[in-house]
Image (cartoon, rainbow, N blue to C red):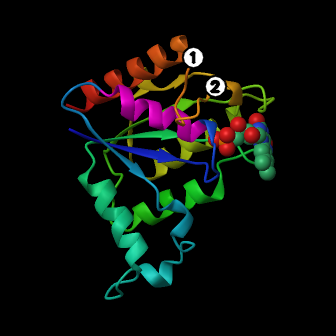
């Protein structure tokens, strides 16, 4: 079972990235996790670069291989300016061309903490909408809100709060069980 971890935040010390690092650390036996780290290197989606007979840029091909190899995907994203970060939307736009996310079991952990006054609700509403357009199978029972502030991220880049760690482990287990 391959679980792809996809962050909507590109910055160092990201709380969303920390949640995914923790998901990797706590994944149950038999679950191989792969952190997708190429979102910042993907070109902006352009249908001309994804047309019949055109070879897609290598960064896109690499992302598609990672998505294709995944049995399930866990997303953790902040909200920027009332919606999904452009980098994450860009990844999802590129998956349309090869239907990589079609029927792929996907869940998210909303880690919005005190820095996010609206609880990133609009970002997750738009994530749900976009995942609907790309035909993903949203694993509702694994989608959850686990607030993680910056102070809950340790020097190793994982979440230190025990309650949050338990909830992250539960979300990973629920998603991967549903995907089996
Ligand atoms: C440019 C910018 C725009 C933001 N816009 C929103 C927003 O619209 N709604 C919200 O709840 N938080 C917003 N935030 C707060 C981020 O969601 C918050 O900082 C989040 O924790 C960042 O996650 P990270 O630590 O993984 O990078 C914004 C932050 C930045 C830098």
Q: Mark 2 sits on what residue?
A: 148
Mainly helix, strand or loop, the magenta region?
A: helix
Assign a secondary structure to mark 2.
loop
Q: Residue furthest front?
A: 155
* Quadrant of image for the N terminus: top left
Q: Which residue is more in the foreground, 126 or 60?
A: 60
Q: Are marks 2 and 1 in contact (CB under 8 Å)?
A: yes
- Residue 2 colored in magenta in the image: no
Query: Magenta segment range?
Result: 16-27
- Residue 21 colored in magenta in the image: yes
Q: Mark 1 sits on what residue?
A: 161
Tell me: residue 98, above or below residue 165.
below
* Quadrant of image for the C terminus: top left
- Residue drawn where x is 56% and y is 54% of the image: 88
Assign a secondary structure to mark 1.
loop
Q: Which residue is more in the foreground, 50 or 32?
A: 32
Q: CA distance from mark 2 to mark 1?
A: 8 Å
């Amino acid at each position: 079972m391959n679980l792809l971890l996809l962050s909507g935040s590109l910055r160092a010390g990201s709380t969303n990235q920390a949640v995914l690092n923790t998901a990797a650390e706590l994944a149950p036996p038999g679950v191989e996790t792969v952190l997708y780290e190429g979102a910042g290197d993907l070109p902006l989606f352009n249908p001309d670069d994804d047309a019949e007979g055109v070879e897609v840029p290598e960064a896109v091909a690499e992302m598609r291989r990672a998505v294709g190899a995944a049995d399930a995907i866990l997303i953790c994203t902040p909200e920027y300016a009332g919606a999904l970060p452009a980098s994450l939307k860009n990844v999802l736009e590129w998956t349309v061309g090869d239907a990589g996310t079609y029927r792929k079991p996907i869940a998210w952990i909303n880690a919005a903490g005190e820095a996010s006054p609206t609880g990133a609700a609009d970002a997750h509403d738009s994530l749900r909408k976009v995942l609907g357009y790309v035909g993903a199978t949203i694993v509702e029972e694994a989608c959850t809100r686990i607030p993680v502030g910056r102070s809950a991220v340790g020097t190793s880049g994982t979440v230190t709060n025990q309650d949050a760690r338990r909830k992250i482990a539960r979300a990973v287990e629920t998603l991967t069980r549903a995907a089996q």
